[in-house]
Amino acid sequence: MFEVLCARPVIDPTLPREMVNLAEWAMKWQKKGQLEQVIDQSLRGEIVPDSLRKFGETGEKCLADYGVDRPSMGDVLWNLEYALQLQEAGVDCDQEDDNSTNMIGELPLRFNDYNNHGDTSVSVAREGRFGEEEEESCGDDLSGVSMSKVFSQLVKSEGR
């Protein structure tokens, strides 16, 4: 993962000693919370801080010393997709200040009514390119559902 972010091979003996091993060098900056120091020059300033943070956390987990501590490929994929969502949300919002807040939490959710099949859906409203409001469907409609019932499902340890 860090090879992509840094646009360089894992081992490069032509670099200064502390930079030869990409994994060690990237982890040094990741642990300091300054992963932007290792980003390829062509990507600098293009990556939303929250997206980079999630990418770095995922890379750090992948480099755990013991295999049992490393995430599954499914978890890696999920985390990378989430980092992409953070990137797209940050770019779409065209934020004026760079305070690195999670922009996904600022998207307004709309809960629609149940349809005839009992399915539910959540829509995300956002402003389009020309100022008009666009709506994206994100799943099932939750308008008739008690939020306490929804959250109670999250704490149950057995499957549904």
Image: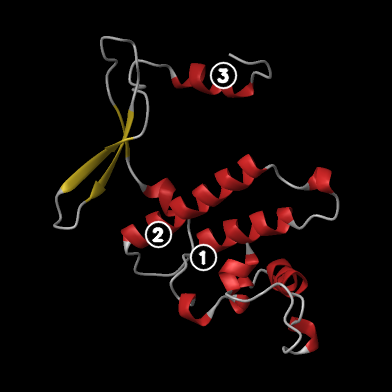
- Dividing the picture into quadrants, the one containing residue 4 is bottom right
Eyeballing the image, is 30 above or below 16?
A: above
Helix, strand or loop under label 2: helix
Q: Residue at x 75, y 90 (%)?
A: 16
Kind of residue at badge 3: Gln
* In-front residue for pair 18/13: 13
Would you name the residue on which mark 2 appears?
A: 90
Q: Residue at x 47, y 68 (%)?
A: 47
Q: CA distance from mark 3 to mark 2?
A: 30 Å
Give neighbour class at mark 3: few <14, some 14-19, many 20+ (Cα, 10 Å): few
Kind of residue at badge 2: Gly
Residue 49: mark? 1
Which is more N-terminal, label 2 or label 3?
A: 2
Residue 153: mark? 3
- Dividing the picture into quadrants, the one containing residue 144 is top left
Residue 69: mark? none
